[in-house]
Image: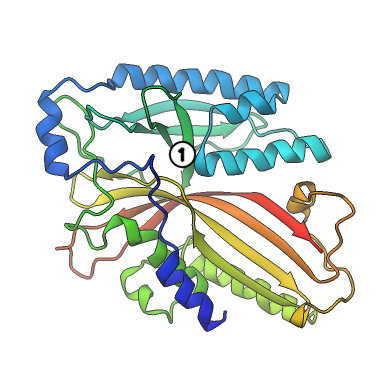
Amino acid sequence: MLAVLAVLAVQGCAPATSGTAASTGPAAQATADAGVQPDLTIAAAKAVYQTYLTQSDAAAAQGDETAGLAIVADAQWAQLNGQYKALASAGTPVARYQYSAPRFYVPAKTSHPQWFVVAAQRRAVTGGPAVTTLLVFERAKPTLAWTLNGSATLDQGQPMPAIATDPDGYAVAVPTTGTSLALTPNVVGATQAAVVDEGPANPAAAVTGSGAQTTGLYAAQAARARAEAAQGLRYQWLLAGAPFPQFGLALAGGGALVLYGMYLNTTTEHPNLVSGSPIPVPTAFTPLLAAPSEVGYHAVYANWTYQFAAIDPPATAPHAKIDVIAATAAPSFGHAY
C-alpha cells in the first residue's frame, strides 16, 4: 500500500463519535449508579430484542425493504441495505436467521443514549452451524425507536469474554476515552486499520494482536493486490473510520470489550486510470451497481461495511495488545466506470 494510506489509517480511521455515541462516563460512575433503578431494565431489553427478531424476520421473508431498514442503523443499516439492493436487482433473498440462548448485557444507565448488547447463538435458516454473535441495540433519544446498530460474529474457537456486572446483574459501561486501558477505545479502530493496511511491519502491530481481522485481513488483501498486479491492474485497500457510535463494556478480569463499525474501501484500476479492457466486478457487488450498464473500463470500486468487537486489555497488563475477536462484513457499495 502507498505510504499515504498508512497516514490515513493512523490519523483518520478511528470510528467517529456522532451525536448518538455511547459516551457513558467513567466505569466507576456506572457502578455508583447501580443502586438507582435504570431507565432501561434487563426485562425491557429482552422485550426489545424479541420484537426485533420478529420484525426483522418478517421483513426479510416478505422482502419488505422499508420495514427491514426502519429497525436498523449504522453498520447494520449499511450491510442490510446492500442485501435489499441485491434482492431488488438480482432476486437474492435477504438473509434470515434463527437465534437461541441469548445473554443480555445491559448497562445501568439513567440517561440517553440507551444501549445494550446481546450474545446469542445464530444460525442461518438455510442451515449450517450456530455461531456466537454479538448484537448491539441503541435508542439515542426517548423519541426515537430502538434499532440494531451492528452485529459481529466471534472468530472460530473464540469464547465469549466474561463481562463485568454489578450486584443487580447490570453491565458496566466503559467510555470511549477511558484511560485505564491499553488504548483509549476511540483509537482501537485506527490501530487495527494501520495493521490491516500496512501489515505487521507497521508500528501499530506492537500493540495489536495477530489474527483473522488484523494480520489475516492484511494478508488476504495483499494477496489480492499481487493477483491483480499479475493481470496488469492496480489494487488498493483502506480500512477506514465510519460515523457510527462506539460501545464499550467492562470485562470481569479487567479491560473492556469495544464494539465499533468501519469501512473497507477497495479499488481495482488500470494504472493511471487509463481506459482499458473491462475490469471484472466481484460477483457480490454486481447487484449493488447503480445500473447494469456500468462497465469498469477504468476502475471498479467494491466497498465493505464491517462491525468489529475487540478486547482492549487493562493498561497494567504485561505486553498488552488489543485483540479483535469478532467481525461481520457485507458488501455495501459498488461502482464501475
Residue 199 visible in the displayed image: no
Is residue 95 toward the left or the right of residue 102 in the image?
right
Specify the quadrant that holds the N terminus.
Answer: bottom right
- Is 159 in front, or is 259? 259
Q: Position of residue 152 (x, y in %)?
A: 47, 44
User: What residue is drawn where x is 23% and y is 30%?
Assistant: 109
User: What residue is drawn where x is 48% and y is 18%?
Assistant: 51
Q: Amino acid at mark 1?
A: Thr
Please tell me whether residue 139 is drawn above or below residue 335 in the rendered image: above
- Is 215 in front, or is 14? 14
- Residue 337, by quadrant, is bottom right
Secondary structure at badge 1 equals: strand
- Is 42 in front, or is 2? 2
Name the colouring of the figure: rainbow
Q: Name the residue carrying label 1.
A: 133
Please tell me whether residue 7 is drawn above or below residue 246 in the rendered image: below
Residue 113 visible in the displayed image: yes
Q: Position of residue 162 (x, y in %)?
A: 26, 42
Q: Position of residue 284 (x, y in %)?
A: 74, 51
Is residue 278 toward the left or the right of residue 64 in the image?
right
Q: Position of residue 158 (x, y in %)?
A: 40, 50
Is residue 141 toward the left or the right of residue 26 in the image?
right
Q: How many marks?
A: 1
User: What residue is drawn where x is 10% and y is 24%?
Assistant: 35
* Classed neighbour count for the residue bearing mark 1: other residues with Cα under 10 Å, few (<14), some (14–19), many (≥20): many
